[in-house]
Amino acid sequence: MGALEVREGFIELYGAEPEGVWAAPGRVNLIGEHTDYNDGFVMPFALPHVTTAAVARRDDGVLRLHSADMPGGPVELRLDELAPESDRDWTAYPAGVVWALREAGHEITGADVHLTSTVPTGAGLSSSAALEVVVALALNDLYALGLKGWRLARLCQRAENVYVGAPTGIMDQTASACCEAGHALFLDTRDLSQRQIPFDLAAEGLCLLVVDTRVEHAHSGGEYGRRRAGCEKGAALLGVDALRDIPHDGLDAALAELAGEEEVARLVRHVVSENARAERVVSLLESGDIRAIGPILTEGHASLRDDFRVSCPELDLVVDTALASGALGARMTGGGFGGSAIVLTDSADVPTLTQAMEEAFTKAAHTPLRVFEAVPAAGARRLA
Ligand code: ADP
Ligand code: MG
């Protein structure tokens, strides 16, 4: 959906021109899973799939929200009535962004918003962050707030954590706001320092497939919160601010200290080893050896499946089938319990691999999966 159609949709709905059109992408995470709430490393890249918003300011304290992906006409909210967890609908995401901006002292007097999206929802590809970031960027521009990408990401995270009530880390919003085409974003979630890492798959004859299992995950569900609480308990027992502070060569000692706390120890082992994997992937990519990251991705999956226990049979089936059919590496991506996996492969093997995964799903009587090639795309931007 181009800027033009979204603009026309806006005019049809609201009977006036929008002041501009913005887009923000979904993302996949290459490596660094469940590390972002442990002050650790993540490495997402943006997808070509975007949420697009046509927006105009209002000066009467009213926020009107419409999404082409949701039934019904625009939803009208009053800015002075916005309150955390008051809204259980999709509108909580954009309303939460407006609330967070106003809470931070930015004067927003109202807006009309029309949204369309090509980011699959609930597939672990971060449609929620794309939705938040596109609204934040539009308001940042229109109200001349002058906020940088990382700052918008923080406000969007606050919207999702506090207003929506979903305890997510900072990765998704930062990826959507800050990624660059042709690059993965190495993000230190402790201080939000970023490095753009060249990630040109095509130049190496490689391809990264995103495989959506069609199993809908639920982030606000209890499992995510329990993992998070378990990590916090681990950090407290080990006397550190966050699990990030346990270096990889201190892992054995940390595990010994956690004797009798087997569940927590498993979570700690995942987070500490995953941070090390993220650092290994960065140095391999910086030395131009994309192929060599394959086994590290696969190791990451085993850790998420066996130690962190956030995989599911469908994700495991994708990973196992891909590896048995010649993939260089594969792992679940995103929070888990469904959503998507990524598969690194030689481009020439894509048809065989895709067929093998589809057949495995048919045989297991799962909902047919959705496979697409992910090319690292640009972060949030103004289109018109
Ligand atoms: P993910 O971010 O992995 O796609 P989430 O559960 O975090 O999954 O967010 C999905 C929710 O975000 C949807 O259920 C919906 O409420 C909201 N959402 C995402 N994209 C849109 C959109 N284009 N229009 C309306 N709501 C959307
Ligand atoms: Mg989300």
Image (cartoon, rainbow, N blue to C red):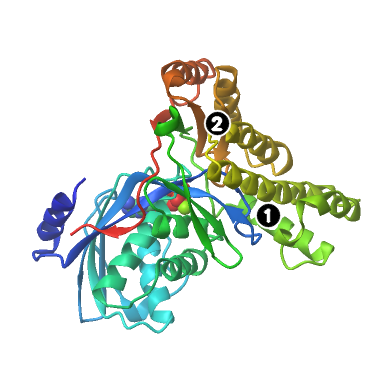
Identify which residue, 116 or 288, lies in the foreground: 288
User: Which amino acid type corresponds to the residue marked 2 in the rendered image?
Assistant: Arg
Residue occupying image coordinates x 60% and y 36%: 297
Q: Nearer the viewer, mark 2 or mark 1?
A: 2
Query: Which quadrant, please, contains the N terminus?
Result: top left
- x, y (%) of residue 204? 45, 30
Q: Secondary structure at mark 1?
A: helix
Q: Is residue 141 above or below residue 219?
A: below
Report the residue marked by disc 1.
226
Q: Is residue 85 visible?
A: no
Numbered marks: total = 2
Q: Secondary structure at mark 2?
A: helix
Q: Is residue 193 visible?
A: yes
Residue occupying image coordinates x 59% and y 22%: 323
Q: Is residue 34 above or below residue 64?
A: above
| Dot 1 crowding, Cα within 10 Å, few <14, some 14–19, many 20+ | few
- Mark drawn on residue 195: none
Query: Which quadrant, please, contains the C terminus?
Result: bottom left
Identify which residue, 260 or 38, lies in the foreground: 38
Residue occupying image coordinates x 35% and y 51%: 378
Structural distance between the alpha carbons of marks 2 and 1: 35 Å
Specify whether tag 2 is near ligand 1 (CB below 8 Å).
no
- x, y (%) of residue 143? 27, 77
- x, y (%) of residue 216? 48, 40
Describe residue 109's horizontal placement relative to residue 286 as left or right: left
Residue occupying image coordinates x 51% and y 30%: 344
| Dot 2 crowding, Cα within 10 Å, few <14, some 14–19, many 20+ | some
Q: Residue furthest front?
A: 287
Report the residue marked by disc 2.
291
Sequence-earlier tag: 2 or 1: 1
User: Which amino acid type corresponds to the residue marked 1 in the rendered image?
Assistant: Arg
Callout 2 touching callout 1 (CB < 8 Å): no
